[in-house]
Amino acid sequence: MIPEPGRTIVLWCPDWPIRAARREAGLDEGMPIALIAQGLVFACSAEARRHGVARGLKLREAQLRSPGLLVLDYDAELDVRVFEPVVRRVEQTVPGVQVVRPGTLAMRARGPARYYGSERAAASALLATLDELGLVGARVGIADGPFAAEQAARVGVSGADAGAGDGVHVVDPGASAAFIAPLPVGLVTDQRTTILLNRLGVRTLGEFAALPEADVRRRFGAAGAFAHDRAAGREQARVLARTPPPEFEVEQHFEPPLDRIDQLAFAFRVNAEAFIQRMRDVRLVCTGLRIELDDERGGHSSRSWLHPRWFTPADVVDRVRWQLQGSGTADAGLASPIVRLRVIPERIDSTGNHEDGLWGGGPDERVHHGLTRVQSMLGHDAVVTASVGGGRMLADRQVLVPWGDRAPERAAGRSGDAPWPGSLPALAPASVFRERRPVALLDARGVEVSIDARGAISAVPERFAVGDGGSGAARRTDGFGAVPVRAWAGPWPVVERWWDPSAAKRVHRFQIVDDDGCAWLLVRDGDGWWAEARYD
C-alpha cells in the first residue's frame, strides 16, 4: 500500500542559472543573456526570450534572433556555489530543506505551517527571506507531494489564489491529482515514451493516469509504472531534509594590514590549528584547500592546493607562505599589505580512509615528512614528481609536478588523452634519455643508413653503436664499437606543425634490437640518428 503523500512546500527561483551568472559577473538586469552548453542554449534570460531565444536553440540561431545577446558558457558548479548561501539563509527561516536542484528547494509543510500559523504564512515568510537577498520574483507552490508542489510553483497563481498576487499557489489537500491532470505527459516520461504516448492519443497526465496500472507496467516497465503513479498523484517521493554541512572554513582580518610574509604566517598560525582541529573533532581530514588573499589596494589572490596525504596546521601555514612569496623569501615584503586571509576546504575525507595498514606505513611517512621538510625550507617548487602528459615525442610527455599537487590535465597546452598522430602506442620505453644520445646505424658496407623523402630506408641496418652524448659527428658515423642488429622495424614519420613552414618539424622513428637483446627507440632528423629511449 502506497502511503499518502505529505504536504510539501517548494520554493522556486525562475531562471536561476541566469541569476547566478549575473551575480558572479556583475551584469545588468536588462541585458539579454544566454548560457551555452555543447553548442546549444541551456538557459536564457527573460529579455532574450522576448527576442525569440529559447532553450535548445543552436548558438548561431540564438545570435541571429537577438544580435545583442551576451553569450556565456554554462557552469554547473557556479550554480551550486552561488546557491549555497541562499540555502543557508532559507534554513534559518524554515529548517529541514532539501535541494532539488540549484534554484529549487523542497520542505515539509507541517512544521512551518504550525510555526507561522498557516501554509500561506510560511510561504510568505520564505518569499520575504528571498526578497532580503535580492531574489525578487521567486514563487512558492504547496501541494500533496514534491512533484505537484513544484508544478504549482511553476504554473503561477490562478484560481482562488489569483487575487492574492503574492507568488504563492496553494493546492487544496486531496486535489493534487486533479490539479496536475491537464499538464503535458512529458513532465513524467522521457522523450521516447512521450512520443509514443502522444501517438496513442495520450497527451496529458490525466489521460496517462486513466490507463490501467497493470497495462502500463507491462508495456513500459518499472520506469513507466513510477511515472504513472506520479501522474495519478500517488507520489512515493518524500522530502529528505539535508544535514547542513559543518563550517570548517576560517577567515582572519588584519588590522593594521600586514606587509611581511613571516608576520602574516605567524599571525595565522592559531587559526590554522583551529581549522584542522575542527575536522579532527568529527574524524575528517583535509586533502585539498583553497586560500584567498585580499590586499589593501583591492587585489585578490586565490589558489587551490592539494596534499599527498592530509594537511596539518604547519602545512596550511606553509601554503599561505608559498602563495605569498612566490619565488621570493619568507622575510620579504609584499607589494601591498594583506587585509584578509580565508582558507576554504575543497576536498575532505574520512580519517578511516587514511589509516595506516596492518603493517604500518612508516617508510612512506618518513619519505613524506622528508620531502615536506625540504619543500618548507626551499619552496613549493623545490621538490617535484614526474607524471605523464601529452605529446608525440617522449621528452615532451615528461611533466614535473610539485610534490603534493595534482598532475595538470593540460601540460604546456597539450592534453594527455587527446589523439596524437605519430605518438608511440603502449608499451612505452622504460628509460627516456634527458639528452638524446648520438647513434651510428650502419649497413653491411659500413655506410650510414638514411631515409628518403618517401620514408624508405637506403639499406638494411646491420650494425649499431651508441655514443655517450655530445655533438661529435665522428662518433655517429665511424661505427667504432658497433654491435650487430638482430631485428628492426620502421621507420614511422612524425610531422608537427606542417601548416607553418617556419616551425614545421619532421622526424622518423625507428626501433631496433641489438645483439644483446636490448631494444632501442631511435629518431632520425636532419642532424642524423639519435637514441630517444631504451626498452629495458
Image: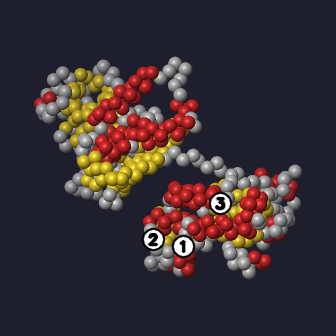
**In this figure, which residue is indicated by the disc labeled 1?**
45
Badge 3 is on which residue?
Answer: 93
Does the rendering let one see residue 474? Answer: yes
Q: Residue furthest front?
A: 256
The residue carrying mark 2 is 27
* N-term mark: 3 or 1: 1
Asked which colour scheme the image uses, the reply is secondary structure
Q: Residues within 10 Å of mark 1 (few under 14, many from 20)?
A: many
Q: Is residue 25 left or right of residue 51?
A: left
Q: Is residue 428 above or below residue 38?
A: above
In the rendered structure, which amino acid carries the disc numbered 3? Thr
Of 140 and 258, the residue lying toward us: 258
Vertical side of 470 occupied by 112: above or below: below
Image quarter of the C terminus? top left
Determine whether the residue tagged by mark 3 lies in a helix, strand or loop.
helix
Report the front residue among 10 and 126.
126
Where's residue 166, x and y in %?
68, 75
Percent x, y of residue 251:
44, 49
* Front label number (3 vs 2): 3
Question: Going by the image, does 425 lie left or right of 442?
Answer: right
Between the residue at mark 3 and the residue at mark 1, the CA separation in whole angstroms equals 28 Å
Residue 320: x percent and y percent?
A: 36, 44
CA–CA distance between discs 3 and 2?
A: 29 Å
Q: Residue at x 69, y 63 (%)?
A: 10
Name the one closer to the observer, 382 or 247: 247
Which element is circle 1 on? loop
Q: Looking at numbered disc 2 in the image, what kind of residue is underneath it?
A: Leu
Q: Quick check: 180 left or right of 440? A: right
Above or below — where is 25 with respect to 347? Answer: below
Taking the spot 44% from the left edge, 68% from the top edge, the residue there is 26
Question: Which residue is at 46% across, 74% downward?
Answer: 28
